[in-house]
Image: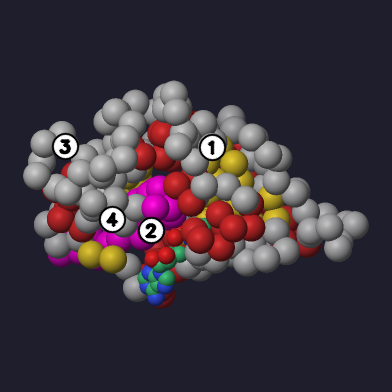
Amino acid sequence: MPEPVVRPASEPEPDPAVHDPAVRRVVEAAARKGIDLRVVVLAATTHTAEDAARALGVDLGQIVKSLVFVAPHAELGHEPVLCLVSGTNRVDVARLAAVVGEPAIRRATAREARDLTGFSIGGIPPVGHAGPVRVVMDPDLGRHREVWAAAGVDRAVFPVSPAALRALTNAIVAPIAAAEDAVAASPAGSGAASSATSTPPATRSLAPAPVDPEA
Ligand code: 5CA
């Protein structure tokens, strides 16, 4: 597996973004859970999953999208729910609603996402949020030995194993991706168009899949 460039070649000093308070909140939150993060700051933006995959030279499926949803509660206001989703997948809101038992859950606006997590879209990390956040993780992330998540700002990411990501976030692992996107969660014989090419067997395990078709 190729090692990505750790800092922009044009800058001999570590990128100042490493010291950004947002990045530090992420690193410190992980450290409190006993996990040492290796933050990689890239010269190019990693605002979207596609940007991050391109900049790192990894499979899009290895990028962790951190998508904020809100469950409206009469007394408690809006409860954030963070979905950690493989870069190739989209969240099926009906599936998410069923998984978390929140029928009215919806996508957060950019402002809600920032207010509820303390981070701006494009840099929203899996950990280090302003308050407690329920986290749901897409089982397709478990198909990779290593995945990359945002580290607080939109040029910073970090590699992590899916198992460590789950431990870090206390995530529940559940099929929340749209059926046409998901591999691990697609029910056999569901009637959904099945790919003509060979598809790895469905798994909900976080162990790396034996074969990574993109590797
Ligand atoms: N740094 C990258 C890869 S780790 C990243 O954070 N990707 S992301 O997928 O988690 O965040 C970008 C996503 O935020 C976009 O794909 C889009 O789904 C979502 N987004 C962008 N603008 C808005 C908006 N105005 N409101 C809600 N969600 C948005």
Q: Secondary structure at mark 1?
A: loop
Badge 3: few (under 14), some or many (20 or more) residues near its Cα, within 10 Å? few
Disc 1 and disc 3 in contact, CB within 8 angstroms = no
Image quarter hosting the C terminus? top right
Residue wearing tag 4: 91
Q: Which residues are magenta?
A: 64-88
Q: Residues within 10 Å of mark 2 (few under 14, many from 20)?
A: many
Q: Seen in the image, is 120 located left or right of residue 108?
A: right
Q: Are marks 2 and 4 in contact (CB under 8 Å)?
A: yes
Percent across and percent down for residue 156 are 64, 57
Q: Is residue 18 above or below residue 195?
A: below
Give, as a three-letter code, the residue at label 2. Leu
Q: Where is residue 61 drawn, in percent x and y? A: 45, 47
**As rendered, which of 42 and 69 lies closer to the eye?**
42
Residue at image x 41%, y 34%?
A: 143
Of the residues tagged 4 and 3, which is closer to the observer?
Answer: 3
